[in-house]
Every structure is written in structure tokens, then in C-alpha cells.
Image (spheres, rainbow, N blue to C red):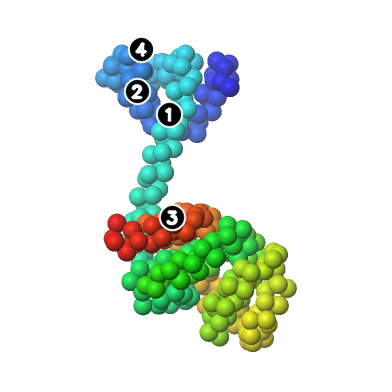
Amino acid sequence: MFTKARTSRFFGGIFRTIPLVALAGWFMLNPGFQGERGSAVAAGEMSQDQLDQRIHDYILAHPEVLVQALQSLDERQRQAEAAEARKVLKARAADIFHDKQSPVGGNAQGNVTLVEFFDYNCPYCRMMAPIMEQAVADDPQLRIVYKEFPILGPDSVFAAKAALAADKQGKYAAFHKALYAAKTRVTEAVVLKTAAEAGLDVERMKADMRQPDIQASIDRNTELAQALRITGTPGFVAGDQIYPGATDLATLKTFVNQARAGK
């Protein structure tokens, strides 16, 4: 709960963390501030110290506007980041949709592509696995691009490298599904056991995991995810849109169909 004393202390911290010009601009355009303290033009004629003091006094009298200001600035930042991510998506479409090192599922010649950034130890990715399978089963023109994005520690990195190595043996899809079917954390031991059960040549897989192109693929995915502002898993890309987080089948299909329609 805000009090005048707490707001006064908090105010100093806000000015240290938010650009003053942005916060001052919000207040000068705020109807309540204009009505109580004069026009935006008049505010613009004040010295910086006078403006700081008037904003300070206004916040003490109306602490709720501080929350509104922060929410407004936060929304503008999100919109700016989303716009920047869309620019990256357009500029790097080849890396996102047609990277030769990224395994492909569904219909490789399909008319729409859904890209998934994921981690085998992410519970939300695990939840999405059967939804992804159903989406492919229901849409014969859906192409899937898998982006190994191991962000949950060394076990996840080992699993991602093993999956990419399995792709070299033509067994990515089976191994991918088997890892998600594990009932426990996907550790190194679980990966090796799953690989053997999936019919992989485990020794060859281990050797392939050490190849530079495997680590390079993971590094490329990580850098690409960061550029697209995908900070967690799962993250999806289709058309010119980015969808962060898990979702249900209906929403995923809508996302894919919007990309197919070019919306």
C-alpha cells in the first residue's frame, strides 16, 4: 500500500532508474497533472529543478499516478521490443525458417512453417509435445522447425546435443518424442538409455555430439532467440509473428493459420 512517506522514498529510486525526460513527458501530457499545475507549455517553461519539484509534489498528492506512469512506460517498452523483434524476424528469415542444421518435422514441403524453441527439461515444453503432435496430425501442410534451445542447465545441453546427433542418424523424430516421454528429469543417463532404446548407435552419437557443428547450432539458436526477444521456453515463430510460452491446441492452430493467411 502506498503512503506519502513511502512514496517520497520510492520517488527518488524511480528517478534513478527511469529516464527523467520520459517520466516528465508522461506527467506533462497527463490531463490530471495539466489541470492541477497548468498547461504542458507552462511546464516546459519551468527550470528542471522546478519541474522535478512539481512532479514530486504531484506524486505525493496522487501516488496512484506513479503506477499508471510505470505501466504506460512498460507497455511502450514492450511495444518497442516487439517491433524490434519483428525487424529481426524479417531480416533473418532464412536462419529462422531454413537453417539446414535445424531438424524439420511434419511436412517438409508444407505451405506454412511453425518454429519451436524448446528445452527437453522444460515442463511447459513437455506439455506442448502432444499438442505439437496433434497439430501436425490435423494439418498435413504444417512444417515444423525444431530449434534446440537448452537454457535449463548442463543436462539440457547434453540432451540437445544428443538430439542433434540423432538427426545425423535419421532418428531425430523418434528420439525427440522419446525424450519427452521420459517420466523424470532428462539427465545424461536418461539420454543415453533413451538413445539405446530408440535404436541409435550410441557410440556414434557420442562422437557426433563432440563435433563443432553441434555446438555451433546450439549457439546459433541461442543468439537467434535472444535477438527475437525469446527469453524462455517454449517460444514459437510463424509468419511474421512470435508467440512466447505454452498454449492450447486451438490457439496454436489459430497462430499457424494466421501465418498461412499472411496476417
Res 194 quadrant in image? bottom right
Question: Residue 75: horizontal and vertical position, in percent?
Answer: 41, 38
Which comes sooner in the sequence, label 3 or label 4? Answer: 4
The residue wearing badge 2 is 30
Type of amino acid at the residue the image marks with label 4: Glu
First along the sequence among labels 3 and 1:
1
Q: Which residue is mark 4?
A: 36
Residue 216 seen in the figure: yes
Residue at (39%, 54%) from the top-left corner?
85
In this rendering, the label closer to the viewer, 3 or 1: 3
Asked if disc 2 and disc 1 are in contact, CB closer than 8 Å, the reply is yes
Residue under label 3, please give it: 251
Q: Nearer the viewer, mark 2 or mark 3?
A: 3
* Amino acid type indicated by mark 1: Ala
Residue 131 percent coordinates (x, y) = 51, 63
Q: Which residue is mark 1?
A: 69
Q: Amino acid at mark 2?
A: Asn
Q: Circle 1: is it few (<14), some (14-19), or many (20+) Cα within 10 Å?
A: some
**Measured Cα–Cα span from mark 3 to mark 1:** 32 Å
Classify mark 2: helix, strand or loop.
loop
Please state, as top left, top right, bottom left or bottom right, where the N terminus lies in the image: top right
In the rendered structure, which disc, 2 or 3, sits on the residue that comes first in sequence?
2
How far, Cα to Cα, is label 4 from label 2? 10 Å
Q: Position of residue 197 (x, y in %)?
A: 67, 81
Residue that extends furthest to the right in the rendered view of this protein: 189
| Quadrant housing the C terminus | bottom left
